[in-house]
Image: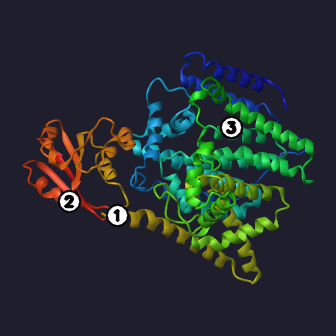
Amino acid sequence: MVLNKALLVSVLAWIGCLYSHFTALPQQLVLVLWLLMIAAMIMSFSGAFHRSAETISWSRRELVLLGVALLLGLGLRLVSLTQFPLILHNDEMSCGIEAKLFLNHPWPQLFSPGWYGHPKIGFLLTAWPMMIFDDRLFGLRFSSVFLGMLSLLGTFLCCRRAFGSSTAIVAVFLMAVYHWHIHYSRTGFHYMQAACMVVWSSYFFISGVQRLSLRSIAASGAIGGLGLLVYSASQLTPVLVGSWLVLELFSKNYSARNLFRFGAIWFGVCLFVYSPFLIDQVLNFDQFNNRASAVLIFAPQNFDHVSSVAGSTNWIAIISYQILRSLEFFVTASDTAAQYGSEIPLVDMFLLLPFLVGLVTLLIKGRNATVRYFAMWLMLAVLFGSILTLDPPFSPHWVVVLPLVPIIQAVGTVRIFRWIKKLRFPSWGCVVILSALVASSVFQCWTYYLIRLNSAGDEPVPRRDWVLRDIRNKPEVKSVVSFFDSPDDVRHEAYQFLRPDVEAYALPPTEFPKLLSLVKHGTVVGIAPIEMQQELDSLDLHSSSAVFRDKWSGEQFVLFRINQG
C-alpha cells in the first residue's frame, strides 16, 4: 500500500462528502467529490506485488466476434423499447418518479434514502438518460439497456479471465440472446444495476487475486461499495467475497497473509465508498428501511405468509418447499409475479444440456480457486435470492444470477464441443450447432416480445396502460376518464411519471354527460365498457374509438378519444 498524494486527495474529497450532510452544498459538487474520492483511493494502491503485471493479447477475430455479440445484444435490447414489455408496472414507474427528481434543480440529497429505502444516488443511474431523451419512458428504460450492455461486456471479461477466450466468446453470445437478461435490460426497474455491479466487482476481484494486484482489489471493493447504494440484490457481493476468502484459508492456493490483505483492502474500500450514506443512516435512522431484511422468510412479520404458502408451520417443511420452488425455476417454473418477468424458466430448453454439463464441470474443477468463486456465486445467489426470501422464484431477487447462467452454459458448451472434436467431427459443425442454439434463443425472445405480446387486442395489459400509451407523448390531451369501477387506476404511478399534468377521473357510467364539460378544456381520452360504445358513437363531436379485449377477464372494452372543437 502506498501512502501518496492520491490517498490525500481521496481523504479530502471524503471529508467534503461528509461535510455535505451538515451544509447546503450543491449536490452536483458532492457527486464530483464522491467520484474523485473513489478514483483517488483506487489510484493510491500500487499495481501488484510479488508477481509482475501480465499482458493479455487480443486477436482480431476475438475482437470482431465480441463486437458482433455486443451489436446483437444491443439490437435485441433496443428494438421497440417503449413498446415491449407492454405493462407499465407501478414499481417501474416508481423508479422513474424517483429518478425524475434529478431533472429538477436543486438535486435531492444524494446520500439519503429514497423509494423503499434505496439511496437516492442509485436513481441517478436511472435519471441520466432521461436528461438526454425527451421521451421519458424511453429514457427510463434506456438506463437498463446501458447497464445491461455494461454487464454483457463485464461477463465476457469475467469469463475470459477465469476460463479463457473461447469460453468467453461463447458466453457473450449466449448472454446477448439470454431471455431473462434481455427482459430486465428492457425495463425501467433498477434491477439491472445489481447485475452490473456484481459482475464488474467479480471481474476486478478475480483479476486482482490472480495477478496479486492491490489496485484491482481496490477497484473491486469500490464497485462493491457502489453496489450497496443501488438495488439491494447486489448486497450479495460482500457476502460472496467474504465467504470465498474464508474458504480459501483452508486451501493452499494463497497464504493467510495475502488473503488478509485482500480482505482488508476490499472491505476497507467498500466501506469507504459506502460511508457517506452510512452517515445519513446514523443521522436519520428512523427513515432507514432495509429492504433486503424485510423480504427474508425469518422476519417475524412474514411468518404467517410463508407458512400459509408452504402449507406448514414446521421450518423444515418450509425450507424444503423453498428449495423445491427455487430449483424448479431453473427448468420448469416461471416467476411468481408475472408482471416482473417472462413466463419462461431461468434456463431455456435449448441450452439445458450445456448448463447441466457446465455445472458438472464446475464441480469437477472445484479445486481451482477461481472455479470455486463461481460455484459460491451460484449457491449464495440461490440461497439469499430465493430459498431464504419470500415467494420463490421471484425473479428480481435472481438478477445477480443472470451473468452467471450464460457463463455456466458456455463452460458446458465448450466441454461438449471438445468431446465432439475427439470424434473427429469438423470444427465448422461445432460452429453450426452453436449458431443454431443462439438462433433458437433469439427466436424464442422474438416470439415472446414481438409476436405473442403484439397480437392485437390480446395482450395481458391493464386497461390503464392502453390509455397511458396513447397519451404519453400527446400534450393536447388534458383529461383521462375511466368508466370502470377502478378508482385506484387514475392514481397509478404511471400517471405521476408519464403525464402528471393530466386530470384523471374515475366516473360511473351515469355521469357520462360530464364528458361534454371536460372536452371544453382539451382533448379527452378514456376507457369504457363495451356497452357504452353506442353512447360514445352518438356524440356529435370529433371522436374515435377502438375495441380491445382484456386477456385475463375476457371482457371487451372501448378506448375512446374526443377532440376539442
Colour scheme in use: rainbow
What is the secondary structure assignment of the residue under circle 2?
helix
What is the secondary structure assignment of the residue under circle 3?
helix
Q: Amino acid at mark 2?
A: Ile
- Find residue 268 and report its horizontal and vertical position in percent: 77, 34
What is the secondary structure assignment of the residue under circle 1?
loop
State whether residue 292 appears in this view. Answer: no
Nearest to the eye among marks 3 and 1: give it: 1
Residue at the far front in the pictured view:
313
Q: Which residue is label 2 attached to?
A: 530
- Nearest the camera: 534 or 100? 534
Tell me if label 1 and label 2 are in contact, CB under 8 Å: no
How many C-alpha atoms fall within 10 Å of the one at disc 1: few (<14), some, or many (≥20)? some
The picture quadrant where one finds residue 362 is: bottom right
Q: Is residue 150 left or right of residue 494?
A: right
Labelled disc at residue 91: none
The picture quadrant where one finds residue 415 is: bottom right
Q: Which residue is label 3 attached to?
A: 225
Q: Amino acid at mark 1?
A: Lys
State whether residue 535 appears in this view. Answer: yes
Q: Is residue 513 left or right of residue 237?
A: left
Labelled disc at residue 551: 1
Residue at the far top in the pictured view:
23
Q: CA distance from mark 3 to mark 1?
A: 44 Å
Tell me if label 3 and label 2 are in contact, CB under 8 Å: no
